Image: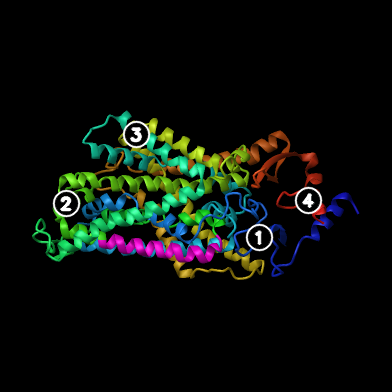
Amino acid sequence: MSYKEEKESELDSYQVSPGSTPPALGVPQFYVDGKDQFVGEKGGNGAQATIQDASGAPVESQNPLGYSVGWWSALFLNITMLIGTGIFSFPSSLLKSLGSVGLTLFYWPIGLLISLAGISVYLEFTAYFPSRSGAEVVFLEQAYRRPRYFFPVAFAVQTVILSFVSSNVIVVAEYIFRMTDHTPTDWQSKGVGIAALTIISLPIWFNTNLALRLSNVFGVVKIITLFLIIIPGFVALGGHLKSVPEPKASFHNAFEGTRNNGYSLSNALVNIIFSYGGYTNSFNMANEIKNPIKTIKRTANTAVIVVAILYMLTNIAYFAVLTKDEIRNSTQVTASAFWAKVFGEKAAKGLTILPVLSASSNILNTMIGHSRMIREIGRQGVLPWPEFWVTTKPFGTPTGALIAIWVVSFIIVIAPPAGSAFNFIVAIQNYPSSFFLALMTFGLFIVRRDRKRLNLPRPEYRSWTVVVLFFLASNLFLLVMPWVPPTGGINNSSFGFFYGASSITGLGIVFACALYFVVWSKVFPKLGGYQLRQIVVALPDGALTHKIIKVRNDEVDEWDSKHDPSGRSLKEYEAAA
């Protein structure tokens, strides 16, 4: 028997047949199906074993980030992201697009149904890979396994490039200056925004528990803020507010004025879908949640249903207090106009602190969830210096990922001038996100096929196929609609020039990622006479990561004979034995 055959025989002893006993904590098992090799590993969060393609980032049996996300934190991670700044200003633009109060109110339940479908899709994915954080990072990696590393590379590059929270940073600065009656210069707004970004970043870096507590507090503040609209609104609706003599006027002939313009109707639906964005935030932290499927199933659905009810009640309150013309023609935040009519201008100005806190909390929660995505990308090994992206030193938090988000956000706030250029850069974020979300949703059918072929047990949660198809349709809608010309001409966009420029640029980033992959994985190895291989690296803080290395062509066979499919040295098994 040759040396290679001997080592392959050793590895065979660690392979198991599909349907066998699940792996123990920290002990990988391999499932081989032709050329496909899967590894089963159990994490420390009490979930079922994660069985994934061997090229996937290794499961951390003890998560160095800890398991700090409890029921309430999981709930408010979603609630705080769901209730953004849009509910305080969006009703004005929605009414302009739809034309009538009745249709405006009808659109919000549609957003709820799409969000519930999305939660169902994410839950099934998470049930397959419950000990991996990062959500879409993992789902795309495992759904599209060929060509190897392609989707990890493509998603990694665009995620890091577009990992900014700059729009909320600017909103915070604008609200702060609105409270002071000061008209800031561009650089004053940028300076206040960067200060806010830095202050909000610090607790996330210093202590995860502190960041989660702040998220919970912000979530409560946001709910209280909505009740400061809902309660006065319903008091007015009951005829008990002198400043509102006709509170039911907007509801008479509620569908009067409905527009039949296809672009306006579709664009409003796009905005509704985005207004519910944030219901996936807790999925990004699945490996920090004990019994993640059970916990997230309850908290994510609860969060989106509660927020949808609050959204409906808030909109009814707006229409009870403000006339359609006041909402449609408002040059300020709808909530500020509401408070001014109910409490007076001075009180309304003071209450602007609440939208400030709302925007700040969105920065906080976006950075918490997104830092886990970027860290998981780092654990795939496709970014340079994986140790930087993966380490949790010095505070047990994702340091490298947080630095990346801060730096990119800083550049986006500082570099472009305020106005159309900034709006254009922010708009670029949307299309790549929709593109990968549609691919991810379709990928669920691929994962199901792989699991069936391996004869693996049914997951802890499985979505109805009709729900998956409904969510896929909504994602395809988000891909198609940005190409429909707006009313007023092709240059009538939020950034003042060709409406499709942001989508084209977003797609260009995706194709640039694909080009990078070809050069990195095909051209350079061919020219350099080497092949890419992955190894599992354990960092001093207990973190596990893949690292992509170069192996010379004449050494590949020997290297392969000394490592299992996931990149662990067979000496580890010998030592364990």
Comparing marks 2 and 3, which lies closer to the viewer? 2
| Disc 2 target residue | 343
Q: In terms of secondary structure, where does tag 1 sit?
A: loop
Badge 4: how crowded within 10 Å, few (<14), some, or many (20+)?
A: few
Assign the C terminus to one quadrant of the image: bottom right
Residue type at tag 2 = Phe
Residue type at tag 3 = Val
- Which span of residues is magenta-colored? 290-313
Q: Earlier in the sequence, mark 1 or mark 4?
A: 1
Viewer-side residue, 108 vs 402: 402
Residue type at tag 4 = Glu
Residue type at tag 1 = Lys
| Disc 4 target residue | 572
How far apart marks 2 and 3 lie (CA) works out to: 28 Å
Q: Earlier in the sequence, mark 1 or mark 3?
A: 1
Residue at 60% over, 63% down: 47
Q: In terms of secondary structure, where does tag 4 sit?
A: helix
Residue at 71% over, 69% down: 21
Q: Answer left or right for 308 relative to 120.
A: left
- The disc at residue 42 is 1
